[in-house]
Image (spheres, rainbow, N blue to C red):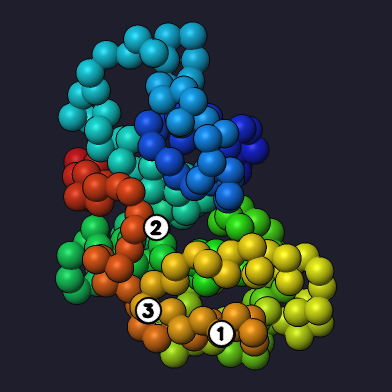
Amino acid sequence: MARYTGPACKLCRREGKKLFLKGDRCYTSKCAVERRSYAPGQHGANRKKTSEYGLQLRAKQSARRYYGIGESQFHKYFLMADRKAGVTGSNLLQICESRLDNVVYTAGFASSRAQARQFVNHAHFTVNGTKVDIPSYLVKAGDVVAVKETSKSTEEFKTVVEANAARPVPQWLDVNKDAMSAKVVKLPDREEIATPVEEHLIVEFYSK
């Protein structure tokens, strides 16, 4: 499936919630969900009650769009989560959270996941000292993600890190803003994941 390149705010409106796809704009009154809290399209404001299947589909689409993951890869993550011990829904979100682009964003080294994905694609980050340019790379407990030495002095990264300095960082990450690095203390538990979706609906969707 090709990556979506249309208006990001339309995705938030379709899901009826903020997916924080536009960085700082999502926290202001310019947010499209704040201004038009109904689905896009000619009949968006008049849509009827959603069916059970519709709720499950929307939960799956919300999670995919929140993390910026394609359908086939998201389904692959579900199969991985289903094979792991524990709760499948929580395992799925844990896998999504451990993507390198998500760690870069969560640590405050990018203003949005889309920007984090671009930074990783452009080889601005290392994992345990080795350059990694794959946004879907899954980090493990103990891994250290850092801005590449030659990228630390650029104004772009200095500006981004400064702009996101006040953003709260979850306890499963140990971030050093000065060194522009983040250590994965452990993989996150469900209560440490702020994803605005109901993962049990995703499990129900794929279990049909």
Residue in the picture at 58% in, 50% down = 23
Residue kind at label 2, given as amino acid type: Lys
Q: Is residue 141 above or below residue 160?
A: below
Q: Which residue is mark 2?
A: 76
- Residue drawn where x is 68% and y is 79% of the image: 147
Mark 2 secondary-structure assignment: helix
> What is the C-alpha distance between the residues marked 2 and 3?
24 Å
Check disc 1 and report the residue beneath it: 176
Residue drawn at point x = 37 percent, y = 79 percent: 172
Nearer to us of marks 1 and 2 is: 1
User: Which element type, helix, strand or loop, lies under badge 1?
Assistant: strand
Evaluate whether residue 207 shows in this view: no
The numbered mark at residue 135 is: none
Q: Which residue is mark 3?
A: 172
Mark 2 / mark 3, whichever is N-terminal: 2
SS assignment at label 3: loop
Q: Residue at x 46, y 35 (%)?
A: 12
Residue 145 percent location from the top left of the image? 57, 81
